[in-house]
Image (cartoon, helix red, strand yellow):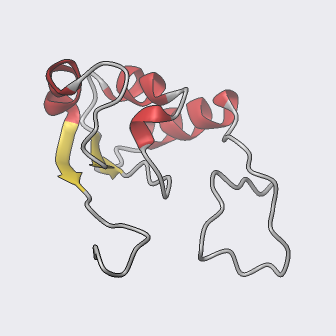
Amino acid sequence: MYYVCTHSIYNNRKTRLKRQLLPLNVLQRILQQGVRLDVKEIIPSTMGEPLLYPYFHVFVEQIKGSETLLNVTTNGTFPIKGAEAWARELLPITSDTKISINSIAKSIN
């Protein structure tokens, strides 16, 4: 099965695919397998703001207490919870947290 989380510029299909979320049960299964196999790092790459993914809390729940770490790239807005709350939640379980300032405008990049 093929899931598309965003309208990626790397989509090599000729037609645009309807935007879909990775289903919760698939995410849970992937994370459980990763933790069980001692995967060192999981990078929730969404080509967007991962902290807005409605199931992002599942990453935190599944990884907390394991040897697996998250590697997160955010746009730095720290939506919904704010920077301090996200820091308390993410810093103990991340290998790296990056703030991306990439823009769609060439003049900004």
Tell me what residue is drawn at x 74 percent, y 50 percent.
19
Relative depth, front residue between 17 and 94: 17
Q: Is residue 90 left or right of residue 84?
A: right
Q: Is residue 47 left or right of residue 75?
A: right
Which quadrant of the structure image shows residue 80? top left
Q: Quadrant of the N terminus?
A: bottom right
Tell me what residue is drawn at x 50 percent, y 32 percent.
32
Outermost residue to the front: 107
User: In the rendered image of this protein, does residue 86 appear above or below residue 2?
Assistant: above
How many numbered marks does the figure carry? 0
Tell me what residue is drawn at x 79 percent, y 78 percent.
13
Q: Where does residue 72 sit, x and y in percent of width and height?
A: 29, 47
Q: Where does residue 23 sit, x and y in percent of width and height?
A: 70, 34
Relative depth, front residue between 75 and 37: 75
Outermost residue to the right: 15
Q: Where does residue 5 sit, x and y in percent of width and height?
A: 64, 51
User: In the rendered image of this protein, does residue 3 appear above or below residue 106?
Assistant: above
Which quadrant of the structure image shows residue 28? top right
Q: Where does residue 101 sit, x and y in percent of width and height?
A: 26, 61
Q: Is residue 24 left or right of residue 49?
A: right
Q: Is residue 93 left or right of residue 31?
A: left
Q: Quadrant of the C terminus?
A: bottom left
Tell me what residue is drawn at x 37 percent, y 52 percent.
43
Which quadrant of the structure image shows residue 4? bottom right
Relative depth, front residue between 58 and 11: 11
